[in-house]
Image (cartoon, rainbow, N blue to C red):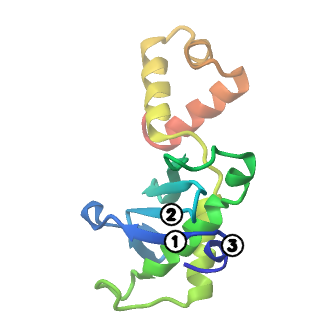
Amino acid sequence: MGRTADMLKGHITDEPDWSKGLAQLGNLAVPAALTITLRGVLDEPDCVIKYEVRDGRADCVSFTVTAKPNGRGLLTSDLRMFTLDGLGEEAFTDYAYDAAVGGEQQGLPDERAARRTISDSLRASRGPSLAVLEEVARLYRENPKRPVVAVETALGISRSTAHRRIREARAKGLL
């Protein structure tokens, strides 16, 4: 771990979940899932952050802060010290390798380029998930007379967003 992790107080570790295999972020191969654990010092809380690569993006999927049994309660300042993108960037960079070379850890990438690729992935515009687009496609097909209204009403979104989701579902080949 690097700069961002150095700002946190406590013992911090990152652990890839190799059972989920590898995923590709740009030209990098990275663990498909990893967990960062921070054990707070003395009475400070502990934290567990989980990341997964989904649809070509590194996403934080879980963030848990827990007070110690005899420690102090949680404070807003405890939450402010976590930069999820920065921590994820550092952890994924630790395990990244150049996918074009092949073979685990055989082609270590230029760290700055790897960090930039991972950072872009963590900060990428999220857009709708595949599950949402599949639901849009289902609603569209089941309501041939007024598909846009069906999507708008069922998902509680504006008409313009419904149109955009329908276009995105088409682009993914769902319609």
Residue 135 vs residue 117: left or right?
left
Residue at image coords 57%, 20% = 155
User: x, y (%) of residue 87?
Assistant: 59, 67
Q: Does the residue at mark 2 contact the one at mark 1 (Cβ under 8 Å)? A: yes
User: x, y (%) of residue 30?
Assistant: 41, 72
**Secondary element at image label 1:** strand
Q: Quadrant of residue 43?
A: bottom right
Is 169 in front, or is 25? 25
Q: Which residue is mark 3?
A: 7
**Secondary element at image label 2:** strand
Q: CA distance from mark 2 to mark 1?
A: 5 Å
The vertical placement of 34 against 69, above or below, is: below
User: x, y (%) of residue 56?
Assistant: 47, 59
Q: Mark 3 is on which residue type?
A: Met
Q: Residue furthest top?
A: 145
Q: Earlier in the sequence, mark 2 or mark 1?
A: 1
Q: Which residue is mark 2?
A: 39
Q: CA distance from mark 3 to mark 2?
A: 14 Å
- Quarter of the picture containing the N terminus is bottom right
Q: Does the residue at mark 1 contact the one at mark 3 (Cβ under 8 Å)? A: no
Q: Mark 1 is on which residue type?
A: His
Q: Quadrant of residue 34?
A: bottom left
Q: Quadrant of residue 151?
A: top right
Q: Residue furthest left?
A: 19
